[in-house]
Amino acid sequence: MNTRRGLLALILPQILVLVLAFCWALPGHAEQPRVIVIHLNDTIQPMSAEYMARGLDAAAAQHAGAVLIEINTPGGLLDSMRQMVGKIIASPVPVIVYVAPSGSRAGSAGFFLLEAADVAAMAPGSNAGAAHPVVEGGKLDDIMKQKLENDTAAFLRSYVTRRGRNVTAAEDAVRASKSYSDTEALQLKLIDLIAPDDATLLNTLDGRTITRFDGSKVTLHTRDAQRITVDPTLREEILDRLTDPNLAVLLLVVGALLIYVEFNAPGTIIPGTLGTIMVLLALFALNLLPIRYTSVMLLAAAFVLLILEAKFASHGVLAAAGIASLVIGALTLVDGPIPELRVHLATALSMGLAFGLITVFLLRLALRARRSKLRMGGDAMIGQVAVVTQPLAPTGQVLVNGELWQAESTSPVAPGEQVRVRGLRDLTLLVERVL
């Protein structure tokens, strides 16, 4: 009897362990798969590249089952796009790029990201393509244009081939600027599937075996996955807004104007502080964007011309040239490949006209104030017209600027007549009759 009890005492714990392990292995108790979600709803530029890289690093650290990048972009900078493609290819976690929601696009640089993914998907009513490289600010000669196209097309082919997608159709998006709807992209094997929403997409991909860029096979487990969204940090959001060229140029111009006000009214502190912060933020933002240095020279020339207008009477010629230089310099300052990364004409015109007119007005006020400070008391009255209050024979009194002064005239002048101040001796004005 004791032997049986001893055997039960030995076997029972092992049975309990097996039962618990079996229950844990049941589908209802299996660990819920996790998918990291990244939203790219902006232009492709350094801050979007930093945000995406942070999301991919978070997925690797959490050992997520996949990364879902929901994309809606008109395109962006070539250098940033190359960095992002490299991050997607090197990601240890499978990457799904999904053009969504309906009506979204993966234009220009966004098309390269779509084709770089382990799984490429689009929502109904979305489109992708038009990936021809653009150099703003002048036409390239035929040789340079061919070099740029060949380099960009070769970069796309380098990973589209390994992804098993349609190389010819992908290259047409670069060389012929072709754009594809969701159904066209699926038929041409540029994407893997069409899904109406991310939940349907993940459930459809569950159990699918994909080939990674390094040739390894991975089976996706994404059904009813826990979606963990990686949100941009406050720093990324602020810098992302600053990469809008229109905002950057406005900050630069308004900041420069506030600094000028501080120089002409020392001690006010607030204009100088705000102006310095604005200029520094603008310079940081412009440093992230492709800048034309000829446009910087135009802006510098505009400031010089506006200063000269305030000092010399040019009847507005220098001011007009300065405002024109300011508008053209601001309009062409950012060498963006897409309209969203360029300064708008309305911004350049409104900013150039307002800043030019305000600057000339303030400069003239400052110069006039400085000249008046050099002429105080009797000196300031030279050239003024006075009214005789006591007869000048040859000395008497005159009223000028509401003040009574002793005056001396070379000829007698009766009270009520007007005289002009020609000089000053001690505290006596030297005047002559106004003919």
Image (tube, rainbow, N blue to C red):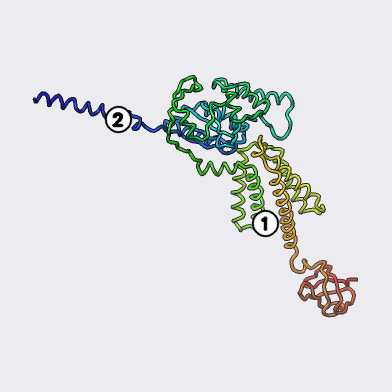
Residue 397: image location, x then y, percent: 81, 77
Residue 352: image location, x then y, percent: 72, 48
Neighbor class of circle 1 (other Cα within 10 Å; few <14, some 14-19, many 20+) is few
Task: Describe residue 164's horizontal placement relative to residue 175 as left or right.
Answer: left
Mark-to-mark CA distance, 1 and 2: 80 Å
Mark in the foreground, 1 or 2: 2
Task: Describe residue 198's horizontal placement relative to residue 383 as left or right.
Answer: left
Write the residue at 72% across / 58% down: 366
- Which amino acid type is marked by label 2? Cys
Of residues 241 and 402, which is closer to you in this image? Answer: 241
Task: Describe residue 423's horizontal placement relative to residue 95 as left or right.
Answer: right
Of residues 214 and 248, which is closer to you in this image? Answer: 214
The disc at residue 264 is 1
- State whether residue 118 is above or below residue 259: above
User: Quadrant of the image for the N terminus?
Assistant: top left
Residue 213: image location, x then y, percent: 51, 22
Residue 362: image location, x then y, percent: 71, 56
| Residue behind mark 2 | 23
Quarter-of-image position of residue 177? top right
